Amino acid sequence: MMRRQKKEEEKKIEDDDDDDDKENMSETSNSMSKNNDDNGEVPEESKVGKLLADRTTKKVIILILSMMIGIILFNTSFYLEKKTGMEMGLKIFSNFASPNDPDVNLTFSIYVSENLGTSSPMVYAKVGYLQYGSSEDANELREQEKNAFSEDCSQLIIIDGANSICEATFDVSKSNKISAILNIVKTCFICVVLTVSSYCFSKDTSEMVLEPIETMITKVKQITKNPIEALQKNEKDEITKALLEEEEQKNALCGCIS
């Protein structure tokens, strides 16, 4: 009987202690919230934070722009002009010595047929006396929508005074439209990358560097204004932290036991 009474008394004491701890936690949290509401002050961003955020954003922008410029500069197409099949096919006709050569008609028909089903189809071609399409169709296209090539083919012209230039015009409006859409998408992608990267850098620097410095500055300002109140507030913060840690430990132990 004595043992049972002792156990019941110990349980009552523990329950009373738990109730006291909960009351202290609620009182301290209420006092903290009241102090914050009374002050009503939102900590402003410090000069260090503004400067650091601006510098990180500028460095990210410079880094991405330098990468883009480097990709262009280290590309061979920036320094060397590549010959396309459209131009090289037209140069073949300058190797023929006479328009009576039977291979001229065959070469011209192959040249036309190979360039009809491409992304830049042939619109007009004239080699000696052979012709495909009309020059009017080629003239209807704007300068940005066509690629025009010419080559000297005087050996394929018998009559004096006739036009001795071989010509070929290709419609590149479709490929230009696709490249324009891709350039717009590339610009949007770069803007998104700049925004996300600058935000990530700013967030990391603010969490790891600026926030501790700013909290320390606010504490120093509070101490200079009212040292006693700042000391009391610091003690209350430490008490709430300790109580929260104890509560978490108890919850963890209860979870392990259950």
Image (tube, rainbow, N blue to C red):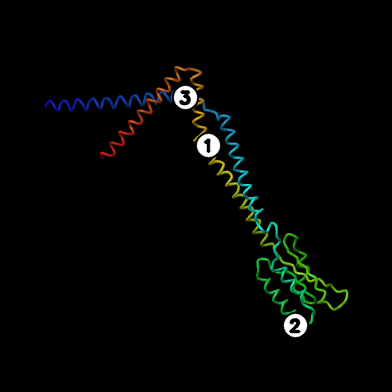
Q: Which mark is residue 37?
A: 3
Q: Give the CA separation, mark 2 to mark 1.
A: 76 Å
Residue 133 percent coordinates (x, y): 75, 72
Position of the N terminus by quadrant: top left
Q: Amino acid at mark 1?
A: Thr
* Nearer-N-terminus badge (2/1): 2
Instruction: Tell me whether circle 2 and circle 1 mark residues in contact (CB < 8 Å).
Output: no
Which residue is denoted by mark 1 in the rendering?
Answer: 205
Which of labels 1 and 3 is toward the front? 1
Residue drawn where x is 19% and y is 25% of the image:
9
Question: What is the quadrant of residue 132 in the picture?
Answer: bottom right
Residue drawn where x is 37% and y is 25% of the image:
239
Residue sitting nearer the eye, 128 or 97: 97
* Nearer-N-terminus badge (1/3): 3
Horizontal side of residue 35 vs 106, given as left or right: left
Which residue is denoted by mark 2 in the rendering?
Answer: 102
Q: Give the CA separation, mark 1 to mark 3.
A: 29 Å
Which of labels 3 and 2 is toward the front? 2
Q: Amino acid at mark 3?
A: Asp
Q: Residues within 10 Å of mark 1 (few under 14, many from 20)?
A: some
Instruction: Tell me whether circle 1 and circle 3 mark residues in contact (CB < 8 Å).
Output: no
Dot 3 falls on a residue whose secondary structure is helix
Residue drawn where x is 65% and y is 66% of the image:
119
Position of the C terminus by quadrant: top left
Q: Amino acid at mark 2?
A: Pro
Residue 32 percent coordinates (x, y): 42, 24
Horizontal side of residue 236 vs 56, given as left or right: left
